[in-house]
Image: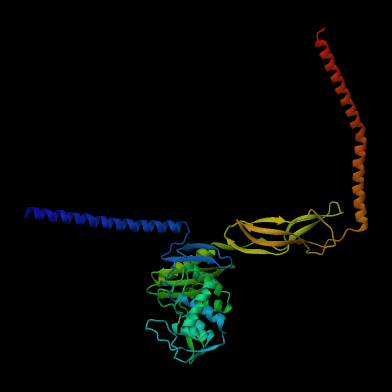
Amino acid sequence: MAPRILSRGVAGATQTVRSTLVALAAIFSLWLGGASEAVAQSSGRPSLQAKAAIVMETSTGDVLYEKNSGKRRAIASTTKLMTVLVALENSDLDDVFSATDYRASPVESQLGLRPGERMSVRDLLRASLLPSANDAAATLAVGTMGSTKAFVAEMNKRARELGLKDTHYTNPIGLDSPGNYSSARDLVTLAIRLRRSEFFRRTTDLDRATLRSGATTRKVTNRNTLVGDYDFVNGVKTGHTNKAGYVLVGSATRDGVTVVSAVLGDPSERARNADSLELLRFGLNGYEVATPLPQGRVVGNIALRYRDGQSVDVVAGETVREVLRTGARTRLRIEGLPTEIDGPLPRGSRVATAIVRSGDKTLAKVPLVTARPVEEAGLGTRLGDLVDRSQTLFALLALLICSLPLVMLRRRAMRRRQALDAEDRRARRREETPAS
């Protein structure tokens, strides 16, 4: 019996040690996680719960932050971004479609369209973007291309044309499917393309909207609550399924700078909003609108031919205004600037080119132009210049003539010196040669 009791005691002690080690490992892991998060926050970089994320400046496509941005993931209702693009490109906002017989599950977001109910494309798009109504998106698909299958084929075609290499669609709604996926980078690229549409920009910046077409007037609310809570946030689209987690493509504008973000795979709506807000703020703080070369700035001057001491200022013919990373430096290089010019030239005549660069990137090539008209040099001016040049030439010639005797005398003296030196060397050789 004793050995059995001892065995149990040892086993119990071993289990206790293992439990203690596991607990310590868990505490250490949590400590490391907290420490790494604190380091990320202190460095100013976003610290996100999302599985994938990105923030991009819209005018340049510059990426300020990314995390697994090219990884293919389920994207839920952000699929509707491509649905909206295809509908915008292949229909008119005033077109009217009949609602398809869409059989939605109880958990899906719906507008409540009855089969055959007629609604304008404008309202169907608003319903697809703001409350993310699946029946509205399904109606857009069938109404635009005649069938869901044809519409999805067009969605994939547009994805290829836009260079969205990590994107593929199997439905226009965003229901979980192995073949329905995209990436954070592709989503922001698509959103930036959509933002060319004024209707899209206005719609995604709405906190709520009223749909007046259809069998009854409907009021809808934007699921992207950041739009209503923060003035600088102006889009774009939410999404959520069990497989995709919580997804949000966001956009924000401040002081002339617009950025678009995407977070995929967040664990909750709260985390999704917090991650998006952090990314958008980080992006807006990371860029500024700079004017390295305003129109009219003097960058040099050119001498006027035949007019000694006179010149004309050269100025920038256009303004260079760019969105740059905060604190970025620029430099200017001038190409093709002549040493002198003559008229007649009107004010604003192009005479050279200014190249504005930041780092290894060329921001702009701007014409450099004359700041005032340049008149043609008259006959008197030309003769005066010729006289001045002739006087200079005569002075040089006189100096040369005066110098010529001196040069000749010097050459004679050198020859005489050389002859004496030669005679001296011959005399020394005669003296050194013994008599025979």
Residue 231 lies left or right of residue 363; in this view the side is: left
Q: Position of residue 410 (x, y in %)?
A: 88, 28
Q: Position of residue 202 (x, y in %)?
A: 55, 78
Outermost residue, front direction?
Answer: 436
Residue 336 lies left or right of residue 395; in this view the side is: left
Q: Position of residue 62 (x, y in %)?
A: 55, 63
Residue 315 lies left or right of residue 196; in this view the side is: right
Q: Is residue 302 above or below residue 249?
A: above
Residue 306 lies left or right of residue 227; in this view the side is: right
The one nearer the camera, 342 or 170, is: 170
Which corner quadrant of the image does residue 179 belong to? bottom left
Q: How is the image coloured?
A: rainbow
Q: Position of residue 15 (x, y in %)?
A: 20, 57
Residue at the spot 38% in from the left edge and 58% down from the top edge: 34
Q: Is residue 207 above or below residue 218?
A: above
The one nearer the camera, 341 or 156, is: 156
Which corner quadrant of the image does residue 287 belong to? bottom right
Q: Quadrant of the N terminus?
A: bottom left
Outermost residue, top direction?
Answer: 436
Q: Is residue 224 visible?
A: no
Outermost residue, left direction?
Answer: 1
Residue at the spot 49% in from the left edge and 83% down from the top edge: 141
- Count of numbered circles on the image: 0
Q: Is residue 386 above or below residue 234?
A: above
Q: Is residue 86 visible?
A: yes
Q: Quadrant of the C terminus?
A: top right
